[in-house]
């Protein structure tokens, strides 16, 4: 699907370049007569017509995507029950508190409601590990702490936790400039 999307994007960009070039060339510049003659040929009509059709189809697809896009729900429903909802901000707070450890610094916590009945949430924790050893064990421990805290807070299982580690070291290069 990603490859098809990339090909469609390249075709869309090429069509846009052709249409803009034809318009700009026929209206502005020293070679307007040549552009008008080129566009007056059968091949010129076909190329510009196909490019305009590609642009129209792409604009229609973007319009449909905008109209059918649903906003992300601000809360999840416990066990699919529409009467009991928990906000994602509360889940982020619980996850941030449960993930706190002396071995890492919590950079960012995001919660996204998933599932057809909005009864599950996916929590993504971005952290900086302060120890270079056993990152997998640290990630599993944080994941288990957050999972248990969310299960106890909600009363039902419904949170999937992902832990991502950010780079813990940055290299700063300084150079001293001496005036002689």
Image: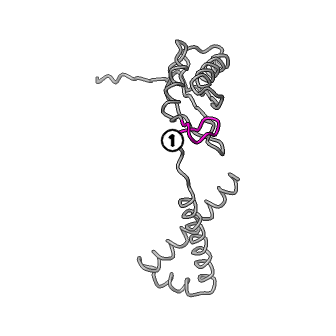
Q: Answer whether residue 140 is magenta in the image.
A: no
Quarter of the rendering containing residue 149: top right
Residue 74 image point, x, y percent? 51, 41
Which residue lies at the image location 65% right of the left edge and 56% below the top edge? 5
Vertical comparison of 66 with 103: above or below: below
- Magenta region: which residues? 74-85
Vertical comparison of 137 with 35: above or below: above
Q: In this view, does 30 lie to the left or right of 134?
A: left
* Residue marked by disc 1: 74
Tell me how the rendering is colored.
one colour
Nearest the eye: 142 or 169: 142
Quadrant occupied by the C terminus = top left
Nearest the eye: 164 or 79: 79
Residue 150 image point, x, y percent? 59, 25
Q: Residues within 10 Å of mark 1 (few under 14, many from 20)?
A: few
Nearest the eye: 111 or 80: 80
Vertical comparison of 111 with 138: above or below: below
Quarter of the rendering containing residue 111: top right
Tell how many labels. 1
Vertical comparison of 39 with 176: above or below: below
Q: Answer whether residue 79 is magenta in the image.
A: yes
Residue 84 image point, x, y percent? 56, 36
Which residue lies at the image location 54% right of the left edge and 67% below the top edge? 17
């Amino acid at each position: 699907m990603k490859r098809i999307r990339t090909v469609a994007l390249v075709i869309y960009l090429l069509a846009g370049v052709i249409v803009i070039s034809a318009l700009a060339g026929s209206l502005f510049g020293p070679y307007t007569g040549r552009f008008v003659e080129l566009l007056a040929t059968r091949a010129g009509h076909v190329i510009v017509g196909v490019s305009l059709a590609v642009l129209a189809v792409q604009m229609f697809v973007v319009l449909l995507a905008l109209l059918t896009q649903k906003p992300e729900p601000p809360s999840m429903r416990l066990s699919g029950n529409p009467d009991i909802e928990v906000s994602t901000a509360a889940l982020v707070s619980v996850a941030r508190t449960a993930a706190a450890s002396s071995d890492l610094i919590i950079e960012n916590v995001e919660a996204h409601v998933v599932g057809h009945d909005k009864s599950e949430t996916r929590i993504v924790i971005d952290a900086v590990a302060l120890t270079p050893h056993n990152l997998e064990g640290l990630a599993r421990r944080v994941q288990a702490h957050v999972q248990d805290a969310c299960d106890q807070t909600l009363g039902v299982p419904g949170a999937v936790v992902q832990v991502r580690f950010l780079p813990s070291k940055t290299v700063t290069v300084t150079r001293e400039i001496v005036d002689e």
